[in-house]
Image (cartoon, rainbow, N blue to C red):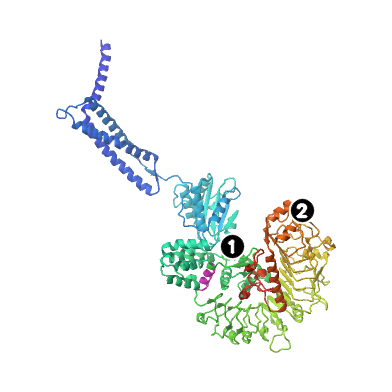
Amino acid sequence: MADFVSPIIDIVSRVMDCSTKHLNYLRALEENLDQLKEEMTQLNELNNDVNNKVIVEEARLKKRTNQVDGWMKRVEDSRPEVDRTILEGTQQLERRCLNGCCPKNCWSSYKLGKKVVNKLLLVEKLKCDGVFEIVAENPPCPPVQELLENFTVGLDSEFENALSLLRKDDIQVLGLYGVGGIGKTTLLKKINNEFQKRSNDFDIIIWVLISSEVKMGTVQETIRERLGLNSWSDSVPLSSRASHILNALKKKKFLILLDDVWEELDLQSIGIPLPSVENKSKIVLSTRSLDVCGAMGTDKTIEVKSLNKEQSWVLFQKKVGQQTLDADPQIPKLAETVAEKCHGLPLVLITIGASMASKTNPREWKRAISELNKSVAKFPGMEKRVFHLLKFSYDKLPSATDQVCFLFCALYQEDESIYIPFLINKWIGMGYIGDFEDFEEAVNIGHGIIGTLKRTCLLENVDDNGERVKMHDVIRELALWIAGREEGKVIVKSGYNLKEFPINDLNPTVVETISLMHTGITNLEKLPSCRNLSTFFASYNNDLNHINDDFFLSMPNLKFLDLSFSKITKLPTSICELSELKYLNLLRREVAIPRGMIMNFSNLEFLELGVLKSDNSSEEFFEFEEFRCLKKLKYLTISISDFKDLVRLLSNPHLCSCLRHLVIRDCKEICLPTLSASSSSSSSHLSLGRLQKLQFLHILNCSEIKEWIFDCITNDDEPEIGLFESLEKMFLYNLPKLIISWDARNLHCTHFRKLHSLRLYGCHAMVDLTWLLLIPNLQTLEIWSCSSLQEIISSSEGFAQSPCDENTTFSNLKYLTLWDLPNLQSICSHTSALPFPSLETIHVLNCPNMRRLPLDSNSAKNTLKKIEGQAEWWNELEWENETTKTHFATFLRSCDARCTITVIVFFSIIFISISISPTSTASSSSIFSAKKGYKLGSTDSDTDTDSDTDTETETLVYPQN
């Protein structure tokens, strides 16, 4: 019986429980609804608390956890359903019968009660799930972090070049270099942000600011944050931090952008693995120094250059604002002038543009132009925002010698093209370069300084062959600002249109340096006593024709005096009182030198004289024998037109050892000079054998010279040496009877080993120039108007005996110019083609009989840049095949007949004037100056022959500066 009853009781119990549960949906509706309201209120409060915590953490750049984010979304999604259920339940209770005790519709009340219970269970679960220890965490590192980028102008070329290089597998380290304020940081930011816009192969890109004082801990902290590594305590050493960074980076393909690098960085001590082809990681760095690029092992470098005029104007307009530019019709034109005064340096454009942004009166703009003409440094904001920033480059120069040599360059006028050898001479003459064994060592030190200043972007190259430099105008202003901080010590008025000495700027008791180059001053009157004045620079004053007799009495301690390229023909007697003088430059003119002057210059180390004529019969003019008093002389430049003076010079061993630049002109007595390494001479041979230190040799207008014999005859007790081992440039002009004899058997000696530039003009007796085989390192060969010349290198017996072959002939030649050579037939008749492994440029003009260039498919590979010549001549040339002709035709720059006539007539006038007047100068900057160049293919209007610029260009004999 019990076995039968027990299951029935169990069934009835289960039915009763179920019935009770369902009855409660109806009976406990009001109670459950109140509880749901209460639970939902608590859930909302909990949600608000969690949300507040999330807001705080997200303000710290953290990211809410996925768990918190999902919970908050579930709470938000549940709220509308719960609110509707509560509203529906409230309405149902209000509609009950029998004083609220009985529902009108039991079925609908049942369903509502069930829903209330389910929502109550949901809310209770959400409450239980809403307890979080951590609501937000550090986010995962994004591959690229966008950087605030300034408005950019003119960086498109550098930007595209950088992106192109970064796509190459063989480029691991890329360097961006340029002067301060030029836009390197802007370019680096642009590269960073570009990788955020486009897909790339890098796992992470990290930007790091290095700055002038490297703080290793700060650099490592920046990288740690980008990698998302845990923070380090202060006790963790730098080496351990480097290990953490290394372990993270070696698993990634990274691009690291290092901004403002001033010195070599030890990447591994930071924790940065070296980029390689294997790990496909890369580094881009920005710096002011090309030396830093080299030390960091850059595979390629990109120079960031100044903006051009149009780009400068765009940036300047942006900073000034259109509202200011529209304020008055005069302002836009004035603003363009102000923008030009910024010289393309973005930092200066931004600084001055911001300063002028509120200036709506044209007079304010005119005043700004006036201030900028006087001194950029004094313009508002320039000293603090620009010069203090740029001065870091000056402060970081390796030595005080580099610094003073840099400041010296500011003595030249704005945009001056400075001839490097003469600049180095002046540095040595100023005493900046000391502690050297011989002069050659000092010159090498000077070239090292030039290299340092160029690589730190404090000097710029002017020409391709690297013979000239210039200062960016803003960098020059920086140098003047640095030099002028001690008021009155330095007066620089170079390039000013002065008519008299700027006496109002003179502080006699303080002044140490005065530079008055390229002014309109006509005479120099006596000055107040300037006992501290050591440097007086007054070259290239084309109107200066008189110096007061007592002028030099006011500067008894003067050590450096440059009066070159003026109209002074007579020196005042007071110059004899300059007993402390170490450097004297009187180039260009024939100057009457007072007797006794040279004897008083016992401390003189550098002497540069123009056309020299001594007079032993006159008590007024000096005697050549006075040179024997110059015991300390190290460097001599001299132009001689008297045969007796030339003989005296060559008989003085000390002068010969000092002679670096010799000009022989209008010397009719020379008939048969012998150039040899011998120290002997004869009545018929004039030996230049003692001039082993000679660097520049110019011979012109010596119409009776018939033969030069290049030989190596020495005395029995003398070792055999090569010809002119120090000679760098040789110019031979208007020597109509000259032929050069040489013996191929002498080729085993080292001849002309430094000679790199040779110019011939008017050497009408020369039939060939096979002796050029003596010059192994020739880089520039220019031949004009040699009417008998038939071939450059002849296939005669002389060549057959020489050790040269087509692989060594002209192996270093870069520039070849052949003008007005009516009988020239070939360059090298013994072979159809030469390799020319260094050749860059060929100029051919009016050489109608030259039907073939020694070029084939293997010539000038990867070096040739252009061939300039007349189209008619080019079309008549013979080639080994059509493919070769087509290849070299791509380098052709054709010039028309009008150009030909212009050039020939122009140069004829110049050289005729030279032959007429021994003191005349060639204003043809097209031949000798890198400052203004004549280009084949231009019209006659392109050739600058303005006589007003005569002294601003090179003369025939001496390069400018």
The residue indicated by pointer 1 is 455
Residue 660 is one of the magenta-drawn residues: no
Q: Which mark is residue 183?
A: none
The x and y percentages for residue 385 are 46, 65
Location of residue 695 by image quarter: bottom right
Q: Is residue 93 left or right of residue 901?
A: left
Amino acid at pointer 2? Glu
Q: Name the image quarter holding residue 817.
A: bottom right
The amino acid type, in three-letter code, at marker 1 is: Arg
Q: Residue at x 68, y 88 (%)?
A: 620
**In magenta segment, residue 476:** yes
x, y (%) of residue 948? 61, 76
Q: Is residue 714 left or right of residue 556?
A: right
Q: Secondary structure at mark 2?
A: loop
Q: Is residue 614 above or below residue 712?
A: below
Q: Which mark is residue 880?
A: 2
* Label 1: which secondary element: helix
- State the separation of the CA atoms marked 1 and 2: 44 Å
Q: Position of residue 308 (x, y in %)?
A: 54, 62
Residue drawn where x is 36% and y is 40% of the image: 68
Q: Quadrant of the N terminus?
A: top left
501 sits to left or right of 465 = left
In this rendering, does residue 210 appear at all? no
Q: Which residues are magenta?
A: 475-484
Query: 10 Å neighbourhood of mark 1: few (<14), some, or many (≥20)?
Result: many
Q: Is residue 128 left or right of residue 719?
A: left
* Residue 382 rendering spot, x and y as whole percentages: 47, 67
* Disc 2 packing (10 Å; few <14; some 14–19; many ≥20): some
Q: Quadrant of the C terminus?
A: bottom right
